[in-house]
Amino acid sequence: MSLPASPSGPRFVAITGASGLIGSRLSTELRGRGDRVLHLVRRDPAGPDTLPDGVQEARWSPGDRLDPGTLEGVDGVVHLAGAGIGDQRWTAERKRVLVSSRVDGTATLARTLAELTETDGTRPRLVSGSAVGYYGDRGDEVLTEDSSSGAGFLAQLCRDWEAATAPAQEAGLPVAHARTGIVLSPDGGALGRLLPLARLGLAGPLAGGGSWWPWITLPDQVRALVHLLDRPDVTGPVNLGAPAPATQQQVTRAIAHELHRPAVVPAPGWALRLVLGEMSSEILASTRAVPGVLQESGFVFTHPDVEQAARWVVHPPRG
């Protein structure tokens, strides 16, 4: 499904994390509707002759000052950069990396946008990444954007992450915090390790399977980010998850059903804690977050229930 053009015409959008699962798809979709994109990268920028049409690159380093001229002319920024939460075991050093890659980078962008506003009076839109981990492990409680933050490392990280946008907010810029759930995709993300097991009939419940997963498919995640870009009147926290949260067991059963495989072999909680350490508490957490702000602003999901999501994950359209 192609995205409609921006209501204000073609736009210039900066993206951090543009090489990741979400950022790469976002860049493609924005260009597909006629926008230009600026990828902020941590390596030497590629030359224009080697980049796709509509793409520019500029170097930045999270935590270091970024010249406001780098973002001159941008209409919006989507900030997705950050070290992978589930890529490694949470050692003390890894936790420092997770924090600094998010908080320092967000503060850098927020300060740069504030400087840019002071210089030329522009008011770029900032859609800054966050996560439903903000709410912590809450059992069956229905969680809206007005719900309090929870306990634990990830909840504290999300609080600090969102607070780092303060310079942009204080400069009067429209800032949204995209509290992303578990992004379902056949090509990576949370299902990157689950799908091969599901194809073998081994994707059973994790420690009982009763935890609520605030899932969202990759197409809806990208469409929601574009929706927020186009709606600068929507500010503050925005839950990015499907309107029908499902338990971990319901998600794996729906995928197994599409694969015509069983989903009965469980992974006990003690085994996950042994392998993953502290990170296991976040994987097993129950977060029943709902996208109230997103739906109230007029967003319509392509995959609103887990059965449709599983069908897309297992049989994604190609080309």
Image (spheres, rainbow, N blue to C red):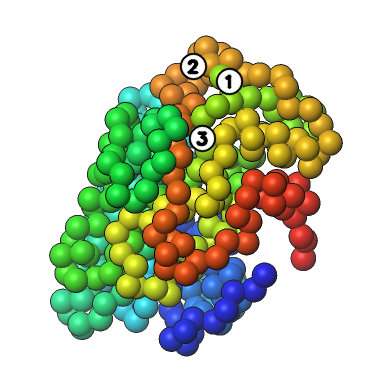
Mark 2 vs mark 3: which is more N-terminal?
Answer: 3
Q: Which residue is mark 3?
A: 212
Residue kind at label 3, given as amino acid type: Trp
Numbered tag placed on residue 273 in the rendering: 2
Query: Which of these two is toward me, 184 or 12?
Result: 184
Numbered tag placed on residue 153 in the rendering: none
Mark 2 vs mark 1: which is more N-terminal?
Answer: 1
Regarding residue 83, the answer to whether it shows in the image is: no
Say which residue appears at 42% left-offset and 64% top-offset.
Answer: 296
Answer above or below: position of 145 versus 29. above
Residue kind at label 1, given as amino acid type: Gly
Kindly check if marks 1 and 3 are in contact, taking CB atoms under 8 A apart as contact: no
Looking at the image, the residue that sits furthest to the right is 260
Spatial CA span between label 2 and label 1: 14 Å
Q: Label 1 crowding class (10 Å Cα cut-off): few <14, some 14-19, many 20+? A: some
Say which residue appears at 40% left-offset and 36% top-offset.
Answer: 141
Query: SS for tag 2?
Result: helix
Where residue 125 appears, x then y in whole percent?
33, 71
Q: How many marks?
A: 3
Residue 268 lies left or right of residue 11; in this view the side is right
Spatial CA span between label 1 and label 3: 11 Å
Query: Which of these two is toward me, 60 or 214?
Result: 214
Spatial CA span between label 2 and label 3: 18 Å
Query: Which of these two is toward me, 150 or 152?
Result: 150
Answer above or below: position of 135 versus 10. above
Query: SS for tag 1?
Result: loop
Answer above or below: position of 193 versus 89. below
Where residue 157 appears, x then y in whole percent?
30, 39
Residue kind at label 2, given as amino acid type: Arg
Looking at the rendered image, the disc whose residue lies closer to the viewer, 2 or 1, is 1
Q: Which residue is mark 1?
A: 208
Query: SS for tag 3?
Result: strand
